Image (cartoon, coloured by chain):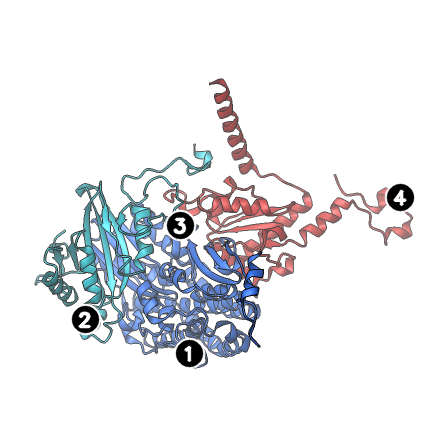
Amino acid sequence: MPEPTAQDYQLDPELQSSVILTSLEWVKGWGRRNALWPVSFGLACCAMEMMAVAATKYDIDRFGAGVFRASPRQSDVMIVAGTVTHKMAPRVRRLYDQMPDPKYVIAMGACTVGGGPYVKHGYHVVQGVDLVVPVDIYLPGCPPRPEALIDAFRKLQHRISEKRGDTLRFDAVEKNREDQRRKAAGGEAAG
Amino acid sequence: MTNESDSQGSEAPPEDPVTLRALALLRKAHPDAVVDAVTTGRHPYIEVTADGLCDACLLLRDHDELLYDCCHLVTGVDRPDDQQIEVVYHLVSYARLPDDEYRKRAEKNDPWVALKVRVPRDKPEVPTVSNVWTGADWHERETYDLVGVIFTGREELRRILLPEDWPGHPLRKDWEFPVEYHGVPIVPPEAQ
Amino acid sequence: MSPRAESTSTGEVHEGQPLVGRDLRTEELVFNMGPQHPATHGVLRVVIKSDGEVVRSLEPHIGNLHRSSEKIGEELPYYQWLPYVDRWDYLAAMNNEHVACMAIERLGGLEVPERAEYIRIIVAEVQRILSHLMAIGVYGLDLGAFTPFLHQFRERERGLDLLDHIAGARLLYHYVRIGGVKRDVSKEWIDELEVFLDAVEKRLPDYNTLLLHNHIFQERTCGIGVIDREVAVRWGVTGPALRAAGVSWDTRRDAPYSIYDRFEFDVPVGPSPIAGVAGDCFARHWLRVREVTESVKIVRQALGQMPEGPVMARVPKSYKPPVGEVYVRGENPRGELATYMVSEGKDRAYRIRCRGPSFSNIAVITEVSEGLLLGDLVAMIGSLDIVLGEVDR
């Protein structure tokens, strides 16, 4: 639904130029998307490019996402920058759980998107971080250039203002897990 | 493996003085420990018995003409065809730096001596050298973790890279991929 | 009666002696640092047993970034495995490739063209400069100084652009190939490189004003986290950490690989003449700063000597080195990278083992961190400049 404007309420023409009417939700979304605080969570190679984005030349602060926090409890977007391994996966999940709502995840790099170069023989690499946490933005590249990460942030901001929340692969995995759990519980009850 | 594996030129390949000297002193002090030695080629090594490994290492470390004070690397190589596992130790010396012979070979980027131990694959037990060189501690743990060599005589032998409950030792040639680990599939769900 | 009251009733109070330590009882506390911690440089997890602010003992837990590259090396042909080498020490991809290619070439007895050797040295040393710049800047960040980080990234970006021009990637290049390098460098690129070297030399004193000669920085690092010669050698510490401890060993000079014997350069050894003692955090930081200058020297000499010619040897499409093994060492920015490779005459290796320098460099903290303050532990880990990619591989 489009946001209501001053015209919709048939305000006095003089007031129309000085009054903005909108929903509180929209204002909240506007504030949220322009002040993203990422958790500084470097896993591997991609973390170097994440640092480059925060540093001199690329300066993500221009887009309001430069306040890298060391604590997940103070941040609202997690950039999973680097390979997630099976040993690391529960910790990634816990960090995600520690973040306050609303929270967003950018899967940065081929490894987090789907295992990357380690997809076939890498026994210890999780085939995509979306098997562990729901992902909002997938950013391919090995590693992605800093420009690409800036683009990912812009896309995330767009998503936030659109209030979209479709995390398909994670949802499918969760549903699968839930089914298995139910089946196991059902089997035990039957047995 | 034989000396002929390295066939460069028609004349006899030059002997490696660094390994020769270590070999001579080892044979003199612990004649039972030395099994075999390759002193030519790109990768000369001395093969010792598992029981004699600790004595050999102590000699290599403490003898005034050897002084190998650092264990650079411990590797396990699985050889299912021979039903054996090789454990290879690469040792370097910083104390011998003024030594001409060592430095001469150093100029060819080879200033190390290699020890090999072969143990049966079904009972891969090697005495630890972590009490000789502290740095070997983590290397031994990694060799246990990935190849499954059991180092005896040390206080704890835990996995170092993989989680504690990981199935098997991945660098064994007959290791099989598990399907999933703690509910996270190792094969992606789309491919199942 | 509480233990506190008991101790005060028996203890004698002397004039001018602080009560804390004699009187105040603290409990031993076990806690976790990492894997998500800005000062662990990745996913290192350290379990610390501390008494108040003092570290009693600690145990590093690694493996959170174990990416099974040794297994992959047994599954893939040599040339397909090379990109994985970049990802060991992702701040020094060119150096990794150099060492891995040397090992593969030595297995098969391949000769590399002269010009390719020079290009390899040039890119490896540029990479060393970039890696050390990062280490210098991030060390400031660890100790609470944000400015050096932002300054060094200006030069680092210029260097990354240079490598981007020849390799097509900013971080992981796959530029050094078996038998040579991917493509030749142009005259324009060399001009750009010289501008970059001048810029680094010009800016280095600025960084030193910010860190090395900064009184607060010296207070935080001098005499902190001392790794002495005996401990460093015993644990297999290599690279700047070993040289800072007073061992004059640089593989480039003492066991020259490639064509490093053709260049004149100094190998700085700790302790730093500015401040501190041998093997402390300050010496390690100072050594990196000095090594940047030496790398600039090497690149300049290499540019002057570089001949014309091909940059790639004739390598058979299916490269099958004969049965044998090699052990190759090379000096990475973080220490000695070594590769043990076993060939069974196939197009892929039978066994590959990589010795990442950070693996041994981080193991040493179990011994030397006892008695450090918690804040100094951060300074200690930062000064070792570890990269978890090669600790876990």
State the CA–CA distance, disc 4 to disc 2: 99 Å
Q: Do the residues labelled 3 and 2 touch (CB within 8 Å)?
A: no
Picture coordinates of residue B11, whole percent (x, y): 8, 63
Give the number of the mark in front: 3 or 4.
Answer: 3
Q: Depth check: B108 or C143 in front? A: C143
Q: Which residue sits at x=63%, y=56%?
A: A65
Q: Which amino acid does label 4 sit on?
A: Gln
The chain coloured cyan in the image:
B
Asked if residue C383 shows in the view, the reply is yes
Q: What residue type is labelled 2?
A: Asp
Mark linked to residue C272: 1
Q: Which amino acid does label 1 sit on?
A: Ser
Q: Mark 3 lies on which chain?
A: C
Mark linked to residue B64: 2
- Compared with residue C126, is residue B170 higher up or lower down, i.e. above or below? above
Give the number of the mark in front: 4 or 2.
Answer: 2
3 or 1: tag closer to the N-terminus:
3
What residue would you read off at disc 4?
A10
What residue would you read off at disc 3?
C66
* Image colour assigned to chain C: blue
Q: Which residue sits at x=53%, y=37%?
A: A169
Asked if residue B43 shows in the view, the reply is no
- SS type, badge 3: loop
The chain coloured red in the image:
A
Q: Which amino acid does label 3 sit on?
A: His
Within 10 Å of the Cα at label 3, are there few (<14), some (14-19), or many (20+) other Cα atoms?
many
State the CA–CA distance, disc 3 to disc 1: 36 Å
Picture coordinates of residue C363, whole percent (x, y): 38, 59
